[in-house]
Image (tube, rainbow, N blue to C red):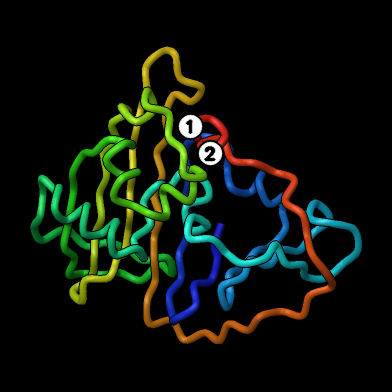
């Protein structure tokens, strides 16, 4: 799924665990603009045209298997502080397939509980609640930035044992910057509804 990010950035999420993002939107396009979430398609309400689901919460960037929001300063500070690898990285490709030759790699491991304390978007994603048992889940993460320090790729991998509703997930998100694009809020026909849910949120909040 690809969605536009105001401010000249673009992200592309490639989840490989849980239910794919395409199922959540039912084949309908979605976009973020001016702090609101817009949807279009029969799953979101009768009729045609765009509808709004209201203001976009901070956790909206994390809907799906990706649990790291690189647009949040608190999250980034936590990752850099706890990284076990902090060095020049290999070339990567951004969300538009452009080769980024000079990158910097950060990698580490953390628990859901530690991320919950450090990351407001993650707390918003889970509705402000995290089961103590779930907080013990450990995940591996990796962030590659370009030479200016903005993220090019974000990867998270986590697995669980018996007794959990989800057995784990792998998510890789790519970003593009300096994209020449004008993002305008669409005309809406009324409020929409979101009939779908999210495996990670349902299982762990």
Q: Quadrant of the N terminus?
A: bottom right
> Which residue position is annotated with label 1?
204
| As drawn, 62 above or below 6 | above
* Image-based side of 104 in relation to 125, left or right: left
Task: Give how far across and how far down residue 43 sits, in percent.
Answer: 80, 51
> Which residue position is annotated with label 2?
201
Mark 1–mark 2 Cα distance, whole angstroms, equals 6 Å
- Name the one closer to the observer, 34 or 139: 34
Task: Give how far across and how far down residue 138 sits, in percent.
Answer: 28, 31
What secondary structure is found at the residue carrying circle 1? helix
Quadrant housing residue 169: top left
Q: Are marks 1 and 2 in contact (CB under 8 Å)?
A: yes
The residue under the point 25% across, 59% down is 76
Quadrant housing residue 154: bottom left
Disc number at residue 46? none
The residue under the point 40% across, 38% down is 170
- Name the one closer to the observer, 2 or 54: 54
| As drawn, 8 above or below 63 | below
Task: Give how far across and how far down residue 174 sits, in percent.
Answer: 39, 60
Task: Give how far across and how far down residue 181 sits, in percent.
Answer: 52, 84
Label 1 CA crowd tier, 10 Å (few <14, some 14–19, many 20+) = some
What secondary structure is found at the residue carrying circle 2? helix
* Image-based side of 93 in relation to 200, left or right: left
The residue under the point 10% across, 49% down is 85
Give the residue furthest to the right.
47
* Image-based side of 189 in relation to 167, left or right: right
């Amino acid at each position: 799924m690809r969605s536009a990010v105001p401010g000249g950035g673009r992200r592309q999420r490639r989840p490989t665990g849980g239910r794919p993002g395409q199922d959540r939107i039912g084949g309908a396009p979605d976009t973020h603009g001016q702090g609101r979430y817009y949807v279009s398609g029969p799953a979101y309400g009768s009729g045609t045209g765009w509808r709004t689901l209201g203001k976009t919460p901070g956790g909206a960037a994390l809907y799906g298997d990706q649990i790291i929001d690189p647009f949040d300063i608190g999250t980034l500070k936590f990752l850099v502080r706890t990284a076990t690898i902090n060095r020049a990285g290999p070339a990567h490709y951004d969300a538009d397939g452009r080769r980024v030759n000079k990158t910097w790699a950060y990698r580490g491991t953390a628990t859901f509980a530690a991320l919950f304390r450090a990351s407001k978007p993650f707390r918003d994603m889970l509705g402000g609640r995290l089961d103590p048992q779930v907080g013990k889940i450990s995940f591996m993460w990796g962030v590659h930035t370009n030479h200016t320090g903005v993220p090019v790729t974000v990867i998270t991998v986590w697995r669980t044992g018996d007794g959990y509703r989800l057995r784990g997930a792998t998510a890789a998100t790519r970003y593009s910057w300096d994209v020449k694009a004008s993002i305008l809020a669409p005309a809406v026909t009324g409020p929409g509804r979101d009939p779908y849910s999210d495996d990670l949120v349902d299982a762990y909040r």
